[in-house]
Amino acid sequence: MKRREFITLLSGAAMWSIGARAEVSRPLIAVLTAITKDGNSPLNAFLQGLKELSYVESLNVDIVYRFAEGHLDRLPVLAAELVALKPAVIVAAVTAAAVAARALTKSIPIVCPLLANAVNFGLIASESRPGGNVTGISFRTEGLTGKQVELALQMIPHVVKIGYLVNVASGVIIDREELETTCQRLGIKTVPAEVRSPDDLDAAFRAMANDHVQAVIVLVDGMFFSERSRIAALAATARLPAIYGFRDHVDAGGLASYGVNLSENFHRAATYVNKILKGAKPGDLPVEFPTKLELIVNNKAAKALGLRIPSSVLVRADEVIQ
């Protein structure tokens, strides 16, 4: 081999080695979400947040995804797959995903954009000082579910019985307890419609319709978000006015929502990831709370149900879909 060829070969090998090391040194972000990849607007908001912080997938950061597609029982297996990859940080989209990941690792940082009841689940020591490897953003404030009940009473006349859709597989019971307490205080009878998978939704709405509930509260849940178009259609078919926690349900045809902007929480989660990648410990990053609650009303859906939304509700709405 000629000397020039040998030097060229060594130079190429060195460049390959540098490139390989650079590729290996890119931080790996693992994303565990309860819903599907398609139509995942919260995930898109998170990726946009990363982009605004100069993180570009496959350029200076790698991202691996796992989607439970509405089946929360898949989360432990998917979490195990991600933990085995030893990522720099895990973004666990919902509390159930954070619980699944935390059961497998107490060292890999976990960021959850939709934390609920995190202290009782043992995910954090306190909101101000999480203390372990989990932090994130709460998706609720105290009294939020009660406000959704009150919204239903303002929008729908003569309500004496409210049904509520709850995913008992999620393990999050704080919203259910708050709803029951609020209805008891207001003298409203409650009818729970418990589900564990998307296959249970049709029967749940039939049961509520047969029980002649006058309104439905759809409690916040990843599976319900994934099935939001189907749930809106089932509610419309059963002629049941339904109130939701996220505007995405209303965009899919639902009647009204009151709660946080889901995509905004995921956008804010990118800031946590950035701080962790730069050396911050999740236990030192306080849990943040929603800065704004929004009311979205779908007037088209109301007309289809024969409802006339009171002006007192319309003037408070952040957006009215015509």
Image (cartoon, rainbow, N blue to C red):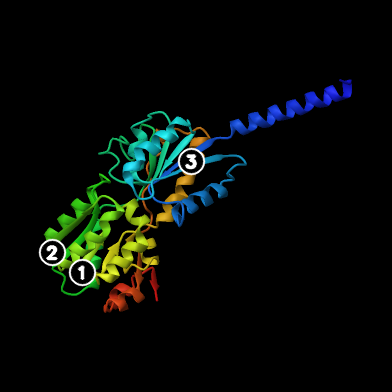
* Residue depicted at x 32% and y 59%: 245
Q: Marks 3/2: CA distance?
A: 43 Å
Q: Which residue is mark 3?
A: 273
Tell me if label 2 and label 1 are in contact, CB under 8 Å: yes
Tell me if label 3 and label 2 are in contact, CB under 8 Å: no
Residues packed near mark 1 inside 10 Å, few (<14), some (14 to 19) or many (20 plus): some
Which of the marked residues, 3 or 2, is nearer the chain's N terminus? 2
Q: Marks 2/1: CA distance?
A: 10 Å
Percent x, y for residue 69? Answer: 39, 49
* Residue depicted at x 33% and y 40%: 127
Tell me if label 1 and label 3 are in contact, CB under 8 Å: no
Report the number of numbered marks. Answer: 3
Please say whether residue 164 is visible from this viewpoint.
yes
Which of the marked residues, 2 or 1, is nearer the chain's N terminus? 1
Q: Which residue type carries mark 3? A: Val
Q: Marks 1/3: CA distance?
A: 40 Å
Q: Which residue type carries mark 2? A: Ile
Q: Nearer the viewer, residue 161 or 39?
A: 39
Residue 207 lies left or right of residue 81; in this view the side is left
Q: Which residue is mark 1?
A: 153
Q: Which residue is mark 2?
A: 188
Percent x, y for residue 202? Answer: 26, 61
- Helix or strand or loop: what does disc 2 sit on? loop
Q: Is residue 320 above or below residue 142?
A: below
Percent x, y for residue 120? Answer: 25, 39
Quarter assignment of residue 199? bottom left
Residue 1 lies left or right of residue 80; in this view the side is right
Quarter assignment of residue 160? bottom left
Please say whether residue 256 is visible from this viewpoint.
no
- Helix or strand or loop: what does disc 1 sit on? helix
Which of the marked residues, 1 or 3, is nearer the chain's N terminus? 1
- Helix or strand or loop: what does disc 3 sit on? helix
